[in-house]
Image: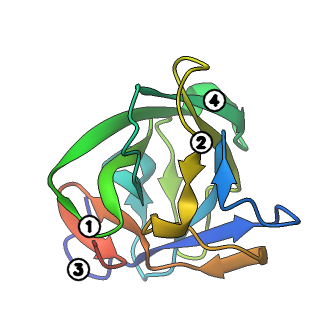
Amino acid sequence: MCSQGCTIKVQYQNDVTPAEPMTSTVRVRVDVLDAGIQSVRSSDVTVRYWFTDPGGVGDKVTCYFTQGGCSDITTRFVAVEPARRGADRYLEIAFTAATTLAPGDHTGTISLGIQHTSSGGALYDQTDDYSYAPNRPALVDWPNITAYVGKTLVWGVEP
């Protein structure tokens, strides 16, 4: 783990056109960069995408793409107690590969979809989701998606 000089940042892309504020699939496309002066083990890094699902019938993740293959990541949903503005849960992305992000390196695009576990769930209303932003056709630094090294917040601002 990095003790000093650890600077991770998360970039986000949402190129869905037209924008889908109401959707059956929340699309999460991120890239994690080591913007610091010290290497970081990818297995020490986690990323949180914060969202709401007030109709909550359960969520599942579909991995569409990662640079090393979908087996290089794990995901889990965590309830936010008490709920915060823009988030009653988050999707946590963790890395399983024993790789290192050297300064200037990045994970490559990680493309995921969040859906309800059954077809009976209401549409997700992304307009009140903390991490969502429409019309981001290219990867941009996005502090509403947070990153951690170990348990330490190193990028972004929690809701």
Q: Dot 4 corresponds to which residue?
A: 62
Rate crowding at label 2 as few (under 14), some (14 to 19) or many (20 or more) other CA atoms within 10 Å. Answer: some
Q: Which residue is drawn at 31% across and 79% down?
A: 157
Q: Is mark 1 on a helix, strand or loop?
A: loop
Q: In this view, does 2 lie to the left or right of 60?
A: left
Q: Which of marks 3 and 4 is in front?
A: 4
Marks 1/3 in contact by CB < 8 Å: the verdict is yes
Q: In which quarter of the image is the C terminus?
A: bottom left
Q: Which residue is drawn at 44% across and 79% down?
A: 143
Q: Dot 1 corresponds to which residue?
A: 2
Marks 3 and 4, how far apart at CA: 35 Å
Rate crowding at label 1 as few (under 14), some (14 to 19) or many (20 or more) other CA atoms within 10 Å. Answer: some
Residue 30 pos. (x, y %): 62, 60
Q: Is mark 2 on a helix, strand or loop?
A: loop
Marks 3/4 in contact by CB < 8 Å: the verdict is no
Q: What element carries label 3?
A: loop
Q: In this view, does 2 lie to the left or right of 100?
A: left
Mark 2: amino acid: Leu
Q: Which residue, as the protein is rendered here, is positioned at the far right?
A: 17
Residue 120 pos. (x, y %): 56, 21
Mark 3: amino acid: Gln
Q: Which mark is residue 123?
A: 2
As displayed, is residue 25 above or below residue 5? above
